[in-house]
Structures are given as C-alpha cells and as structure tokens.
C-alpha cells in the first residue's frame, strides 16, 4: 500500500480497501494495517527525518522504494507503536527486507534501524537518568 502511494500516487488506505475486495484477509491484520498506514501518514516527515539522519551517505531519494517503505514501517513501529518492542520491530523489518528487497536490503535496513534505535533510546535513557 505504501509502495502504491509512491508509484501511483494512490492513497494507501484506498489501496488497502482494494486489497480486501480481492484477497481473503483477517480483520485483525487489516485493522493493524490501517493503524500503521494512518500512523505513517501522520508521522511521515518525522519518520523520513530519522531515516535521513541515520543514512548519512544516502539521500532518501536514493533508497529503493521497497527498502524506504520497510524502513518507514520499522521506524513507526519502533518509535510510535507501544505494543511492539523496538527490537522486534527491527527484526520484523529485516525479515521483510529479506523477503521483498534486494540481496543487500536486510543489512541496509538493519544498519539504519539500529542507528535510529541507538540514537533514540540513548537519548531517552540519558533524559531519564
């Protein structure tokens, strides 16, 4: 759905509705997908900012669409989704990279998300201390 937004300019929630019209689905998965899509849309500028900061030698525009959207999902889950432990969000994003990305995607995704994780949670633990 995020990929369709990038390539066709289609609203991700509309793409999700079209998906449910064609393919069998579980309601809990569709609800979580809706939550992710809404959250990513709301926080996209911040999420992309985290990705830009962590990918020092890559502009956001140079990152493949698949990897960029997997990163957006990973960052959203890691930083905004209270029910998903950050390290689980990273592991899930790495698995998505292995399944849908290129040969290098999982390592790239791991590096970016690990950097964001360390940066964010290091700051948070310093502020708490």
Image (tube, rainbow, N blue to C red):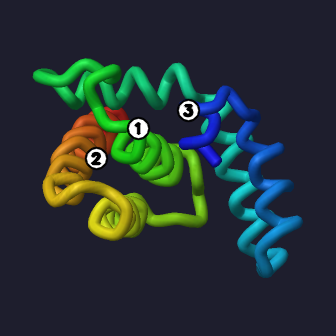
Q: CA distance from mark 1 to mark 2?
A: 16 Å
How packed mark 1 is, by other alpha carbons closer than 10 Å (few <14, some 14-19, many 20 or more), is: some
Q: Earlier in the sequence, mark 1 or mark 3?
A: 3
Residue 44 rendering spot, x and y as whole percentages: 56, 28
| Residue at image coords 59%, 65% | 83
How packed mark 3 is, by other alpha carbons closer than 10 Å (few <14, some 14-19, many 20 or more), is: few
Report whether residue 42 is seen: no
In the structure shown, which secondary structural element does the residue marked by tag 3 occupy?
A: helix
Kindly identify which residue carries mark 3.
7
Residue 49 rendering spot, x and y as whole percentages: 40, 21
In the structure shown, which secondary structural element does the residue marked by tag 1 occupy?
A: helix
Q: Is residue 55 above or below residue 105?
A: above
Kindly identify which residue carries mark 1.
65
Q: Is residue 65 above or below residue 19?
A: above
Q: CA distance from mark 2 to mark 3?
A: 24 Å
Kindly identify which residue carries mark 2.
113
CB of mark 2 within 8 Å of CB of mark 3?
Answer: no
């Amino acid at each position: 759905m995020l990929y369709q937004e990038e390539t066709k300019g289609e609203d991700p929630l509309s793409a999700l509705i079209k998906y449910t019209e064609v393919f069998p689905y579980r309601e809990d998965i569709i609800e979580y997908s809706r939550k992710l899509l809404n959250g990513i849309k709301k926080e996209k500028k911040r999420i992309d900012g985290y990705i830009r900061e962590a990918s020092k030698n890559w502009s956001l525009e140079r990152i493949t669409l698949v990897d960029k959207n997997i990163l957006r999902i990973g960052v959203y889950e890691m930083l905004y989704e209270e029910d998903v432990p950050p390290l689980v969000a990273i592991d899930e994003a790495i698995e998505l990279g292995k399944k849908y990305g290129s040969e290098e995607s999982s390592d790239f995704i791991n590096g970016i998300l690990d950097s964001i994780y360390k940066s964010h949670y290091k700051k948070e633990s310093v502020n708490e201390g």
